[in-house]
Amino acid sequence: MPYYSEELVEEVRSANDIVDVISGYVRLQKKGSTYFGLCPFHNEKTPSFSVSPGKQMYYCFGCGAGGNVLTFLMQYENYTFPEAMEALADRAGIELPKQEMSQKARQEADKRARILEINKIAAKYFYAQLRMEQGNIGMEYFKKRELTSETMTKFGLGYSNKFSDDLYQYLHKQGYEDDILKDSGLVTIDERRGGHDKFWNRVMFPIMDANNRVIGFGGRVMGEGEPKYLNSPETMIFDKSRNLYGLNIARTTRRPYMLLCEGYMDVIALHQAGFDNAVASLGTAFTPGHANLLKRYTKEVYCTFDSDGAGIKAALRAIPILKEAGLTAKIVNMKPYKDPDEFIKALGPEEYQKRIDNAQNSFMFEIQVMEQNYNLKDPESKTAFYNAIADKILEFEEQLERENYMQAVAEKYQMGFENFRKLVMHRGTRGGITKEPRTLKSGINEKNKKEDGMKQSQKLMLTWLIEEPGLFEIIKPYIGPEDFTEELYREAAKLVFKQYEEGKLNPAKIISMFTEEEQQKEIAGLFNARLKEVTTQSDKEKALKETIIRVKKNSMDYRSKHLDPTDMAGLQKLVADKKNMEKLQKLEICIFPPNKDKI
């Protein structure tokens, strides 16, 4: 592991029961030996997120998210591995020794800490500059925007003065070298100009993470200059797609929803007006990472974007992302004003609250925007519009939801409900949308049959070995780790076989041995493969035998194709495997006990 020994990682992981930890985030219900709930990583109506106390793993059969308790915190809380370790160690009352860090890991951790330190010093420096004579231009700008001194203090607002190497010189005197200053994103180093500041002659907005640590900055230029708004580049502590401006304050709001804005000033103006639940993306388009971040704190998001064309486009982009994350999206109408800041200055907080109370359903907003592309006085264009609405309604998976939206649309556009319903059903049947997906005997839907069948067989083999340790003695004469032709599967198989030989199968520990998040997710999938339609004991045993044969035959074919003609040992192994295959064909397998959970 990059930071802690394998033994310590396992001590912390095993001290935190995965069901107990995940129950704090997801409502789980026990079914057989496994717990199920709605997946926190994608939007679903039917629970496909499983948590296995036996394996100490979670796996979503819908989106494929999976791992152990450490992986869960890293995915859900956006923690780094050390942060997940610290959280779980603290939860279990385990003290993490500092000396466990490798030299490289210590250097990375030190570097991260130093960049956070530099950002904190820079924030204090900008804050002080705003309140000095050279910061008058910035102070005048904020006063013109009607910000109080309390608000400016609350958000740590500052100013970077007109000298383009001012902060660089200050930080240099504090003992920070060029390399670390460059990595902080606050300074640019080049041969011709030397060190110079990323931000100068700008009012400054410190960007904080959910734990109130300064991770970056936004700056608005004073006077003429491009770009008008400038943000810190991404660094090892600053990921624009996983942080939101104002969330450090908004996360503690008592309001049951979040207000999603476009700009920093909108967030600040709303907070000053008493709406402490406002956040904004950081100079970038709204992403699934932002939506998942919001999902930790709320179930409803009110988009309060600019009322111009760009704001409408931003809302249309955000709506499907919010829905995909399982969040309800509504649209706050700012007209005739451009944005929340302008609206509140003109009409006050009470009127803004009324706009929130009357916020538009996101689907009806999308229909309203679509309507502008059609001439409803022209019969042909009007028909095309109704067809487009029908197609959009068919995007809803549940019949009840489709019915509700058909009713709402029919009322809004004064259509007969039954006629409109027939139109929706006609277009759905014609496009094959309302038909039930055909399920193959294997239990895999045709639309999901993207995965190679051999990969699935190898996954099933590993899942069965984990769930039925008695299989090892049966398959050992025929199957070994070398028979798994996918590299990652082979690595996992080596660890599974090794654990069996040592008498301690522990799939959750195996996940911790892989450092990449994608690898951990794939390993979790290897230990959670299923054949949905196979239920009886004899069917299970037949499927097992077929799987062993497929895996072995594939292994032999693979080795035959890649065999060096001079490799006599390899050739002899293939001959021996062929004879073994004949024995395997005649083998009767009796391993799965009756009434076992589905495999």
Image (cartoon, helix red, strand yellow):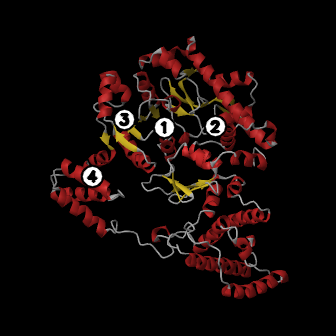
> In x, y percent, where is residue 135?
55, 15
Q: Where 460 falls versus 224 (above or below)?
A: below
Residue 547 found in image quarter: bottom right
Distance CA(mark 1)–CA(mark 4)? 28 Å
Q: Residues within 10 Å of mark 2 (few under 14, many from 20)?
A: some
Q: Residues within 10 Å of mark 3 (few under 14, many from 20)?
A: many
Amino acid of disc 3 = Asp
Q: Which residue is mark 4?
A: 404
Give the residue at x 59% y 21%. 126
> In x, y percent, where is residue 105?
76, 42
Amino acid of disc 2 = Ile
Please give the label number shown on residue 297.
Answer: 1
Q: Which residue is mark 3?
A: 306
Give the residue at x 26% y 61%. 424
Q: Where 17 falls versus 206 (above or below)?
A: below
Residue 98 found in image quarter: top right
Q: Nearer the viewer, mark 2 or mark 1?
A: 1
The quadrant of the image that shows the C terminus is bottom right
In what element is the residue under mark 2?
A: loop
Amino acid of disc 1 = Tyr
In the rendered structure, which disc, 3 or 2, sits on the residue that comes first in sequence?
A: 2
Q: Which residue is mark 2?
A: 237
Distance CA(mark 2)–CA(mark 1)? 22 Å
Distance CA(mark 3)–CA(mark 1)? 24 Å
Q: Where 396 falls versus 439 (above or below)?
A: above
